[in-house]
Image: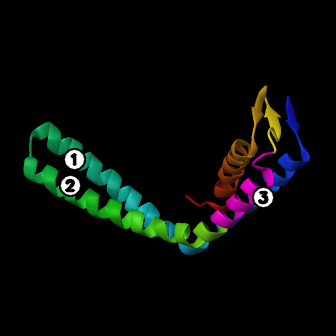
Amino acid sequence: MIEITEAGYIIALISMGLAVMSALVRKAVLDQEKMKETKEKLKRHQEEMKQATKSGDTKKLQKAQGEMMKLTMENLKHSFRPMLITFVPFILVFTWLRDQYGSAGTVASLAGFDLGWFWWYLICAMAVSIIINKILKVS
C-alpha cells in the first residue's frame, strides 16, 4: 500500500523537523490566551451582526463590522510574527530539497498514487503538524 524510497524517508524526516520547529516557534511567540480571547470576541461580534441584520439595525451592524475588522487585523498581526521567524529556514530547506530531489521522480507511493518530493513533503508535514499542534496545544 505504501512504498517509500530512501529519499522519501529523508524528506519525511525533514518535513517532521520543520513541522516541529514551526510549532515550537508558534508556541513560544504566540500568546495563546490572547488568540483564544480574540477568537471568542470575533464569534460574539459575528452573532451581533446576525442579530443586527435580522432586525435591520444598520448602526449596530456597522459597529459590529468595524469591531470585527479591528479584531481580525489584530489577529493577523499577532499570527504574522511566527511566519517571519520561520520564513528563512523554510526557504533554505525548500531550495535544498528542490536541488536534491527535484529530479528524483517518485519518492513515495501512497494508495496507488506516485508522489514526487513536494507532495510527499506536504502530506508528511500536514500529518505531523496536526499531531504536534494537538500535543503542544498550539492553534
Q: Are marks 2 and 1 in contact (CB under 8 Å)?
A: yes
Q: Are marks 1 and 3 in contact (CB under 8 Å)?
A: no
Q: Quadrant of residue 13?
A: bottom right
- Residue 64, numbered label: 2
Q: Nearer the viewer, residue 16 or 115?
A: 115
Which residue lies at the image location 38% right of the left edge and 57% below the top edge?
40
* Horizontal and vertical percent position of residue 133: 64, 57
- How would you rate the neighbour count of disc 2 (Cα within 10 Å): few for under 14, some for 14-19, many for 20 or more? many
Q: In the image, 2: left or right of 18? A: right
The magenta region covers 90-103
The three-letter code of the residue at mark 1 reads Met
Which residue lies at the image location 75% right of the left edge and 49% below the top edge?
102
Residue carrying label 1: 49
* Residue 6 versus residue 33 in the image, above or below: above
Q: In the image, 48: left or right of 114? A: left
Residue carrying label 3: 14
Q: Earlier in the sequence, mark 2 or mark 3?
A: 3
* Horizontal and vertical percent position of residue 128: 72, 51
* Distance (Cα) linking label 1 and label 3: 45 Å
